[in-house]
Amino acid sequence: MSETIDPLLYLREFVISKKPIQIVDKHLDFGNGLLRLPLDTKTAWQRRDKKGYYTLGSLFFMVINSETKNSDYCREAARLNIPQVSFQDKPLVVGYFLGETNECQ
């Protein structure tokens, strides 16, 4: 039997529980090797502007940089080649993954 996970729910659980997540070799490493998913893993989170869907890496990077200055966030995302979350979507993304809201798109 094949077991599948929803990367959005998995990421949310780890962020809320403050379990370790780190970027390692273009992957998100959950729980020090428990699970590794590519940064470019597609998710079901659609952009508000309807120009596609966010990747797991994009959502994670926004959450960990939610307090970072816009210019620093943009520069670091570009350096790591991680597509940016639009600032129109930022409050929804951050609120969901920090557990402030229970709904997402």
Image (tube, rainbow, N blue to C red):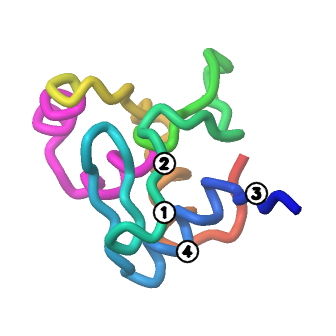
Examine the image and state in which quarter residue 57 appears.
top left
Find the distance from the CA under tag 4 to the CA under tag 1: 13 Å
> Which stretch did the figure color magenta?
59-77
Secondary element under disc 2, as helix, strand or loop, is: strand
Which residue is painted at 23% across and 31% down in the image? 77
Residue 70, image x, y percentages:
20, 37
Q: Residues within 10 Å of mark 1 (few under 14, many from 20)?
A: few
Which residue is painted at 55% across and 37% down in the image? 41
Residue 53, image x, y percentages:
62, 28
Amino acid carrying label 4: it is Glu
Amino acid carrying label 2: it is Leu
- The circle on residue 35 is 1
Marks 1 and 2: in contact by CB < 8 Å? yes
Work out which residue is located at the far top of the displayed protein and give it.
51
Secondary element under disc 1, as helix, strand or loop, is: strand
Q: Earlier in the sequence, mark 2 or mark 4?
A: 4
Q: Earlier in the sequence, mark 1 or mark 3?
A: 3
- The circle on residue 48 is none
Q: Residues within 10 Å of mark 3 (few under 14, many from 20)?
A: few
Amino acid carrying label 3: it is Thr
Q: Residues within 10 Å of mark 2 (few under 14, many from 20)?
A: some
Secondary element under disc 4, as helix, strand or loop, is: helix
Viewer-proximal residue among 82 and 103: 82
Amino acid carrying label 1: it is Leu
Q: Earlier in the sequence, mark 4 or mark 1?
A: 4
Residue receiving disc 3: 4
Marks 4 and 3: in contact by CB < 8 Å? no
Residue receiving disc 2: 37
Find the distance from the CA under tag 2 to the CA under tag 1: 7 Å
Viewer-proximal residue among 66 and 6: 6
Find the distance from the CA under tag 3 to the CA under tag 4: 15 Å
